[in-house]
Image: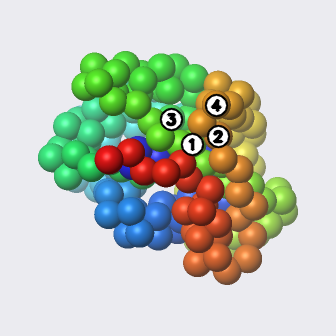
Amino acid sequence: MRLVLIGPPGAGKGTQAALLSAALGVPHISTGELFRDHGARGTALGRDAERYVESGELVPDEVTVEMVRLRLDEPDTGRGFVLDGFPRTVAQADGLEALLSGAGLRLDAVVELTAPEQVLVDRLLGRGRQDDTEEVIRNRQRVYHRDTAPLLSHYADLLVSVQAVGPVEKIAEEVLASLPAQAP
Ligand code: ADP
C-alpha cells in the first residue's frame, strides 16, 4: 500500500501515519523527521534545510525530493509506505510521480486530514517542539494554504478526506475503512 497523508500542521499526520504504518505493515516516512534527523547528524542536507525548518518555510523542492529518493531506495519500502508531510507542493508531487513510475509503481491513495484552524494551533502550541512558536506555527499554516492545498485538486482521483477530530484510533479506523482494496 502506497499512501500519502496531506493536512495542515497540527492535523495529526504524524500520529495517524504511525498508526496506519503499523496496521498496514509498511514504513512511516516523515520528511519533517528526516530533516530533523539530518540536522541532528549535521549532514550537508541537514545544513541546507536548517534555516527553512527553523522559520517554517518549505525546504527547496530539489533538496526534499532528493532526500525522499534516497529514503525510498531503502529495501523496507518494497511493500509500500505511508508518506507524512510529502509531497507538499505540486512540483514535489511530480517528483514523486517520476520516482514511482520509474519503478513501475503508483500511489494507491492520498488521505487528507482536516480539522478547524483553532484546534490546529492549540495542538501545536501544546506540543512544544522547537519550531512550534506561535509565529512559526502561523507561518506554517500560511505556507500550507498557499503551497500544499493546491495538491488536493491535483490528487482529486485518489483523494480520501477524513475529519481528524476525536480519538486517534477511531480516526485511523475511518482512514483504513476508506482505503481502496489492497492490490496483491
Ligand atoms: P508540520 O507538519 O508541523 O509543519 P513537519 O515535521 O512535517 O511539521 O515539518 C517541519 C518542517 O520541515 C517544515 O516546516 C518544513 O520546513 C520542513 N519540511 C517538511 N516536509 C517538507 C517538504 N515536503 N517540503 C519542504 N519542506 C518540508
Q: Which mark is residue 157?
A: 4
Q: Which residue is mark 3?
A: 87
Residue mark closest to the camera, 2 vs 3: 2
Tag 2–tag 4 contact (CB < 8 Å): yes
* Mark 3–mark 4 distance (CA, rounded to whole Å): 16 Å
Labels 1 and 3 touching (C-beta < 8 A): no
The front one of 82 and 1 is 1
Label 1 to label 4, Cα distance in Å? 9 Å
Which tag is nearer the camera, tag 3 or tag 4?
4
Disc 2 is placed on an element classified as strand
Disc number for residue 110 = 1
Q: Mark 1 belongs to which amino acid? A: Val
Q: Secondary structure at mark 3?
A: loop
Whole-Å distance between the Cαs marked 2 and 3? 14 Å
Write down the residue under mark 2: 159
The numbered mark, 1 or 3, whose residue comes first in the sequence reads: 3
Location of residue 22 by image quarter: bottom left
Report whether residue 36 is seen. Answer: no
Q: CA distance from mark 1 to mark 2?
A: 5 Å
Q: Name the residue rendered at 48%, 26% in the picture.
A: 92
User: For the residue labelled by badge 4, is the local secondary structure a helix, a strand or a loop?
Assistant: helix
- Please provide percent x and percent y for residue 80: 32, 47
Residue plotted at (15% across, 46% down): 75
On screen, residue 113 versus residue 73, left or right, reads right
Q: Residue at x 75, y 70 (%)?
A: 165
Mark 1, residues whose alpha carbon is within 10 Å: few (<14), some, or many (≥20)? many
Whether 58 is drawn above or below 135: the answer is above
